[in-house]
Amino acid sequence: MPIIEVNHFTTRRLQILDPSGVVDEQLMPDLGDEALVGLLCSMLRMRTFDEKALNLQRQGRIGTFGSLRGQEAAQAGLTLNLIDEDWLVPSIREQGVLEGRGLPMHLYYSFCKGDERASQIPDGLNATPQSIPIASQLLHAAGLGMALKLRNEEAAAVGFAGDGATSEGDFHEALNFAGVFGAQTLFYIQNNGWAISVPFSQQTAAETIAQKAFAYGFEGMQVDGNDVLAVYVASRDALDHVRSGKGPYLIEALTYRMESHTTADDHTRYRPAAEVEAWRARDPISRMRTFLSRQGLWDEQQEAELVAKVSAEVEAEVEALEAMPRPPATDIFDYMFAELPATLIEQRQQLIAESRNGK
Amino acid sequence: MPIIEVNHFTTRRLQILDPSGVVDEQLMPDLGDEALVGLLCSMLRMRTFDEKALNLQRQGRIGTFGSLRGQEAAQAGLTLNLIDEDWLVPSIREQGVLEGRGLPMHLYYSFCKGDERASQIPDGLNATPQSIPIASQLLHAAGLGMALKLRNEEAAAVGFAGDGATSEGDFHEALNFAGVFGAQTLFYIQNNGWAISVPFSQQTAAETIAQKAFAYGFEGMQVDGNDVLAVYVASRDALDHVRSGKGPYLIEALTYRMESHTTADDHTRYRPAAEVEAWRARDPISRMRTFLSRQGLWDEQQEAELVAKVSAEVEAEVEALEAMPRPPATDIFDYMFAELPATLIEQRQQLIAESRNGK
Amino acid sequence: MASDAATALAPSSGERMTMVQALNQALAQEMERDPAILLMGEDVGPDGGVFRVTAGLIERFGDQRVLDTPLAESGIIGTAIGLCIGGFRPITEIQFMGFIYPAINQLFAHAARLRNRSRGRLSVPLVVRMPYGGGIRPPEHHSESYEAMLANTPGLKTVIPADPYDAKGLLISAIRDDDPVIFLEPKRLYRAFRQAVPEEPYTVPIGKGRVYRPGKDVTVIAYGSMVQVANAAADRAAKQEISVEVIDLRSIVPLDVEIFIESVRKTGRAVVVHEAPRTCGFGAEIVAQINERALLNLLAPVERVTGFDTIFPGAVLEDHYMPNPDRVLAAIKRTLEF
Amino acid sequence: MASDAATALAPSSGERMTMVQALNQALAQEMERDPAILLMGEDVGPDGGVFRVTAGLIERFGDQRVLDTPLAESGIIGTAIGLCIGGFRPITEIQFMGFIYPAINQLFAHAARLRNRSRGRLSVPLVVRMPYGGGIRPPEHHSESYEAMLANTPGLKTVIPADPYDAKGLLISAIRDDDPVIFLEPKRLYRAFRQAVPEEPYTVPIGKGRVYRPGKDVTVIAYGSMVQVANAAADRAAKQEISVEVIDLRSIVPLDVEIFIESVRKTGRAVVVHEAPRTCGFGAEIVAQINERALLNLLAPVERVTGFDTIFPGAVLEDHYMPNPDRVLAAIKRTLEF
Ligand SMILES: Cc1ncc(C[n+]2csc(CCOP(=O)(O)OP(=O)(O)O)c2C)c(N)n1
Ligand SMILES: Cc1ncc(C[n+]2csc(CCOP(=O)(O)OP(=O)(O)O)c2C)c(N)n1
Ligand SMILES: [Mg+2]
Ligand SMILES: [Mg+2]
């Protein structure tokens, strides 16, 4: 047959909990009540820490910061599946995942102040610092996944990025290397509809990001990123696949950035209010809250208690933030090399001399 | 339905003329006898010019050079569809296409000598010079295709690359930009199985290059690149599509590099002789010759006449090559800017002074 | 930062504008003049650029002239090269100079080389606008000054305005230039002060520096945002009876060698100031030029006041890194006390 | 090119080897020593690298230690960074320095910065081997010398051996270094001459230059393949009773400032030689250092003998571009006749 069908790919999207709070019983994961409630709690925590950051920024106590509001399900559903041995390779909007994995939030806040000690991730947390050059970190996730594979470790590297990041060459090279070397990497793309002011429709002519996995010879799928249960299930299965050495995996979590790109941006310049409103109706938190309330697992009092508890934690983190002494100016030099070469020692001396003169 | 099938893609491969020289009558293009014979002739021309280059290189009359042997069908079938208004954006192994479009071969040979005047493509031939940084030229093809689209011109930009090139970030960015802007670009990838010593199976985990089009939201297909009729048909249809502004297109021509990567390479170090032999049986020229002979369109005498004619042309080109005077040393400076800045005028003077002193 | 000297060279006529406004006006006027000019970049469309330099242009010229691109710097420069070959004159924006790295291959291996490679048949009339430099306390990669590698790459011109008037005139020259021009915008000066900018289009020639402030004891050579720092140091020096001549290079390639050599021949002392790291920074080239052409005039070693050979620090430590008037003044004095 | 002086500093024991052999031996011995070391790059596997530097290593260490990668330089450096974080010590090969551009973002924005960014928690013990420089008449992009931009980028070390002995010792030091080291291999010297190279592993310290040839009238400062050119010029100068001291820097970052300053203090005259373009090339940094530290010793301007500010030309014109002993000798004489 001279026109041969060589192969094909179907892009699938998973949703379990619909925007009105109704679940698909057949797809419902076998999670205990505690875990279900835990998912809501972790989303609420994320939102509370996020709102605090907005406040701190408005008060000038931290600098520019990019809100994750709207993406809580996409981050909480994944986080529940992570194990200590996994490596997290975040971009710039994964504070929810990091918080969920134990990063003290005063470090995140201090990052927004421009204090680089924030990127000294505490011991025991396998995470790389926030990576600002878009998509570049995905190669580190691919390399980490290669390392896990070479060592036969049952763990995954999770590389995070946004929809905009999929346009960069490094996205392509990362997925291609991962495919070739069977890297134990989950590429986790939060498609929040916008890259600053550029809508997804102008980022690529492809209908989905998930289908891009086909270009690299491995599996990919779309998930309703505002449905914490679907995110949980999809990432659980993908992580199992990845950790067991069956090759990399791509998840596209379809979600929405409710706020401006960062506090330095004004989204009203470029996107219609109606779009934002439409997505407000698909809020990941209220959806889960409705479901749990109907199940009798959540009520206003529980919510009030949780909010009080988290608020206290938030305040403690803010205190910790403000108790951080200024880093010494010599920090500029002291982490450049394992051993400082002579020219840098000389320059460091110059800095010290100048600082002493009152500058 | 909570698991939604969003979309799908099927990779198809076209073959019309099989390795034994038999055609699929239903798919056979409506080409007159002259055109059919012309396809064989242009493949024979390519091979003759190529063999001459090998000789010249062995004799030290030109430098390193990359043979296209085995890829004649992939280049001739496409070339027949090109029109003057199209833009060619070659990589490093498209001398067949360029020859077919009228590039004097002494320029190609002189390129292999390291004479940069070879890259001053003659007026009237819309082609960019050979691009050595792998895959980088595909972005120029995308940009040219955007230019044609912006001007509403019924022409195509054809970006050439090899299988290895598909791993570079620029391949990705080029196809993605082309998709987004509806560029009038045909991406024409000759998958000749090897990137120097790296086999296609280690270049990507994807089964085909054609399927990568799905990642960019446009069409792609595979063609038997040793079947000049299939290449003709596939590229005719793709060029029609592209020129009429329906969006970019990706063709993967499956072929084989019969020689070493270049004359500086030794392919016996890394690939099995049996593989090369297997592909010799699929030679694009003998396949077409068999078909035309059976049709009574080609015989030994015709072949002898053609070879004689082309050989004379080749010799004329070699004469032209050797008649080229050495470029003046000042050529190093004279094309750097539209207007030479003072520092370069100074350096140019220095060069002239040194050359006068006999160096 | 708006000292009198900062605007001393400005013409008296014209609306008083920030650098952002002057750039925006230059873009609009040139796009009006020549339909082959396109704008391309991330967020240059409805958002008007993250610094608002392209504000209003997509509304005025439409989305066939102002292209919001996918997030891919190599893609931006690479397709712009293709558009040049296809007869357009694209003005590209890279959001911050810290994000130019992914495009280096297209810029250095192609844009800078295509005229030479094609022996003049093809050219790349491309402008690459990039906000560069420190002073606004942003996150990592948003404060960088990578001009030295541009200067070491043959085939590119690199222009750096120091005030709104020059910004408009130099940008128009860059747009009309038939070769690739990198146009670095000192982001800390975007809105730092206003200056009278004539309404009509005008050019400031590329490759000619200017004496920003005449003086006779020491020459301070700077460009971009460091011109203001040099000038502030000169103000202070003046109070101590030291007369400083400030040279604004305006472009580093082509370099106006004459203007600073002449000044150093007169003063015998020089300080060069830039934000980029010291080792192999553009200051080294200035020192080498002075060494070659005015060694016998030198009364003291040329001083380099630069960033350290470190990563540009986060906001909290930024002030310790950036050259400031204190450092420049101290260097001026070292040349006098040598 | 194998003058006596070229091997004057070599030890007497050990097999006489080319630079390619010395590098291959260093790689094999270090991989034997430390299982965390990986080799990665295009064609480093069964092909043994296009210059055969990695020949035999995949056969010996297997395809879990020697990785033929897809054709993507950013991918090579980027995944190598990930492998570093994951506990490996990758030695990457970029086929020619002319192809490093696509990897610049990974190299400059990450490899060079990760230790600093993570405040010491993470490090990048990466080696990036690249053949660099001219002299073999290849096509475009195969002769480039881009060391200046490396030197201007904080966080990287850049090492450049000039003979087989140093090649082995410096490569072993680079592999054992806990920070990213760019290892530039002067491809024209790969097989240009042999030298006795001890069998056992040894290190040559990074950051220490050497007096390649002692002399007293003029100091010539060079690195990589230009050390041979400098030495040839010194040979000729000697015939004219001019005693030239040749300094081989061996690494440009860290830079052994002392060694050439001391020499210039003694001779009062200096010539710096490199193949890369002149403007903002590494020579400018050398001149600046001499200006800062030995101005009063200078009897003449420091001369720069460099490539032109042009694209490295095709084979036909290559000889007109490359610094050669004639040019160096002429510069030496200019310093004497000043
Ligand atoms: C290489 C690079 N180019 C440009 C930027 C500036 N920038 C920061 S975030 C951003 C948009 C990112 O969009 P997306 O990937 O969708 O992530 P999101 O912000 O939506 O989470 C841009 C253009 C950058 N940080 N790095
Ligand atoms: C950016 C870059 N990296 C590496 C090289 C060296 N190189 C030249 S050709 C080649 C292999 C190309 O393979 P492919 O794309 O399949 O084309 P083919 O040679 O098979 O036609 C390599 C690695 C290069 N020219 N450019
Ligand atoms: Mg986004
Ligand atoms: Mg190939």
Image (cartoon, coloured by chain):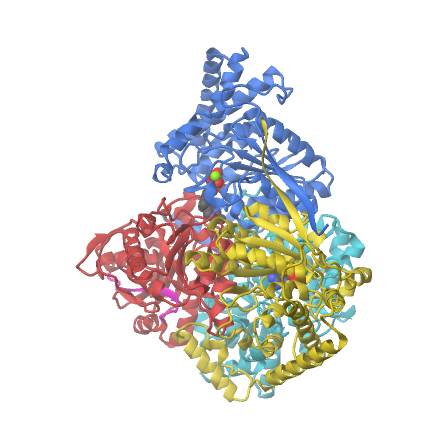
Chain colours: A yellow, B blue, C cyan, D red
Question: In this picture, is A244 found above or below D218?
Answer: above
On the question of residue D142 being in view, the answer is yes
Instruction: Report how many numbered discs are placed on residues in the image.
Output: 0
On the question of residue C310 being in view, the answer is no
Question: Considering depth in this image, is B135 or D71 the residue closer to the camera?
Answer: D71
The picture quadrant where one finds residue C73 is bottom right
**Residue pictured at 58% horizontal, 19% vertical:** B36
Q: On the picture, is C240 further left or further right than D226?
A: right
Residue C162 image offset from top left, x and y in percent:
64, 69
Q: On the picture, is C71 further left or further right than B226?
A: right
Question: Considering depth in this image, is D336 or D255 the residue closer to the camera?
Answer: D255
Question: In this picture, is A198 found above or below B219?
Answer: below
Q: On the picture, is D275 further left or further right than A48?
A: left
User: Which portion, as a residue range, is magenta?
Assistant: D241-256
**Residue pictured at 46% horizontal, 64% vertical:** D85
Q: Furthest residue to the right?
A: A274
Residue D331 belongs to magenta span: no
Residue D205 image offset from top left, x and y in percent:
31, 68
Question: Considering depth in this image, is A72 or D180 the residue closer to the camera?
Answer: A72
Question: Considering depth in this image, is A221 or B49 the residue closer to the camera?
Answer: A221
The picture quadrant where one finds residue B319 is top left
Residue D89 image offset from top left, x and y in percent:
39, 62
Question: In this picture, is A183 found above or below B311?
Answer: below
**Residue pictured at 46% horizontal, 45% vertical:** B202
Q: On the picture, is C10 further left or further right than D200?
A: right
Residue A187 image offset from top left, x and y in percent:
57, 57
